[in-house]
Image: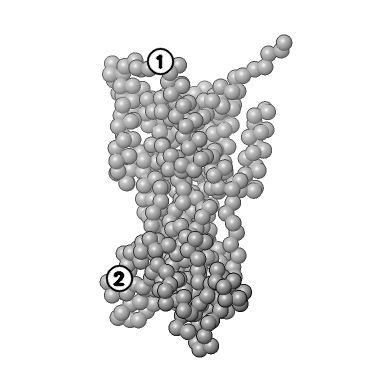
Amino acid sequence: MIATTIVAIIFLYFWLNGPLLHGVEILSLETIETKFSAPILVGGDGVDSKKTQATFQTLNLTEEVGFGHGLLFLKKTLPKYYGFIAALADNPGLSPELGAKLLEHAQQFSKPSEKATLLPSSNMYYVSVVDTLTAVQRIYLESTDIVANIRGYAGAINMGVFIDEKGDIIEAVHISSRETQSYLATIKRAGFYQQFEKVNIKNGGQELDAVSGATLSSEAMASTVSALVTLGIPYPVSNYADIDQVKRFSLAALLNSTWILHCLVIFLLFAFALQRRFKKTKKTVLIMNVLSVVYIGFFLNNSFTYISFLHPFVGTSVSSLVGLYSLFVLLGAIWGKNTYCKYVCPFGNVQRLIMRVSPKKARRKFFISNAWIYKIRMTIAIVLIAGVLLGLRNWSNFELFPDLFGWASLGVWFMVAVCTVGITMVYPMIWCRLLCPTGAVLDGITDLMKFKFKRG
């Protein structure tokens, strides 16, 4: 009861308040820009710094000249170069290396008839893309090294976006991330990127449908695009699109109401596993195994892992489905001696189904003692958790669940997952017993529940 109360309090806290780490809120700004205040970049790929010295004096020269205002014209006539100088040290989005990549990506996603030109703004590079045949213009922005504190399943997701003169998002593209390939394939297959084409930045707050089975990744993509466009307001987005007033733009990806049905199915699996009124027969357990593999595994591909517990501590918001799923798993560990691993986990159930059809004579005695199995699996879990909390977010991909059930990607890790479950014909449940960090965490909670205080 004490453990349940603690879990309920923590769960409600994070549900109401979100993760412990939050990104800095970006306010929508409005400025009036003229040709005298258009940002320029001095040095690197921008204006030649040697030529500019004759036109500008910067703050570090004010003591020598004695004016004390910086950026003062030394001549009464209008100089060739004018505007604000952006400091590279304070604006990582203006690094020459990043600018070169930005131009390369814009050209990659542009038509052959379009000409791409790299331009600097006050805090980021952007690319002007003009069709040489129709003279239609659009701009390209990218979130790499600009948008911070937004995380998907395995860290930041870099997105690129094309915006036209009307403020419509023409195209949103995935540039790079450490997300599991099966999640990215699920998002693409669901047509998630096409939803951005219905977004206009002048319409304020808008919503997209998150992809079930890749909820965290799709939510992070929408939030990244939202933050990127907001950073581009007022310059270059507002000036380019000739928008006098931009409502406070925001974009979020939310699960539609079908998540309630998914949550209900998962709840019923846990409820049947925990109840003691009806006896669990081989037939009912087989039905649970198949339902778990087909529905949660292949249909939802909604993996629950130990990382789900860590998301609030690394700044990743959790959807209601994942949150309730986590609650069921925790309560199953507290009250049912790790119900999730025994009955609900699709990856474990795949191995159980294989064992049903594999010959018993092929099975061998495990080559490691139970005591060492426990130590190895717990050590793996502790090292991975520490690594993720210290910032090594790609370590969270040490799970074969999404690779096995994301069969459409058919990559190297899919083959590793297939071989791992195949080995269970010889060494039963090898992943669950020896390598699974999620099982180690849940078994640790179950063991903690067995601890009893002794009176002196």
Viewport quadrant of the C terminus: top right
Instruction: Tell me where residue 209 appears, x and y as whole percent.
Output: 49, 57
Q: Which is more N-terminal, label 1 or label 2?
A: 2
Circle 1 sits in a helix, a strand or a loop, which is it? Answer: loop
Picture layout, residue 291 above or below residue 320: above
Q: Residue furthest front?
A: 64
Please identify the quarter of the rendering in which residue 323 is found.
top right
Q: Is residue 16 left or right of residue 410?
A: right
Q: Position of residue 98 (x, y in %)?
A: 40, 61
Residue shown at 29%/41% (left/top)? Answer: 412
Given contact means CB atoms under 8 Å apart, are the residues at marks 2 and 1 in contact?
no
Callout 2: SS: loop
Answer few, some or many: residues within 10 Å of disc 1's Cα (few below 14, many 20 plus, some between 14 and 19). Answer: few
Q: Which residue is mark 2?
A: 111
Label 2 neighbour load within 10 Å: few <14, some 14-19, many 20+ = few
User: In the shown orientation, is residue 375 left or right of residue 407?
Assistant: right
Above or below, 227 against 419 in this view is: below
Residue found at x 63% / y 34%? 7
The quarter of the picture where the N terminus appears is top right
Answer yes or no: is residue 416 visible: yes
- Residue 369's disc is 1
Q: Position of residue 332 (x, y in %)?
A: 56, 30
Location of residue 314 in the rendering, given as x and y in whole percent from the top left corner? 54, 44
Residue 344 seen anywhere in this rendered image of the structure: no
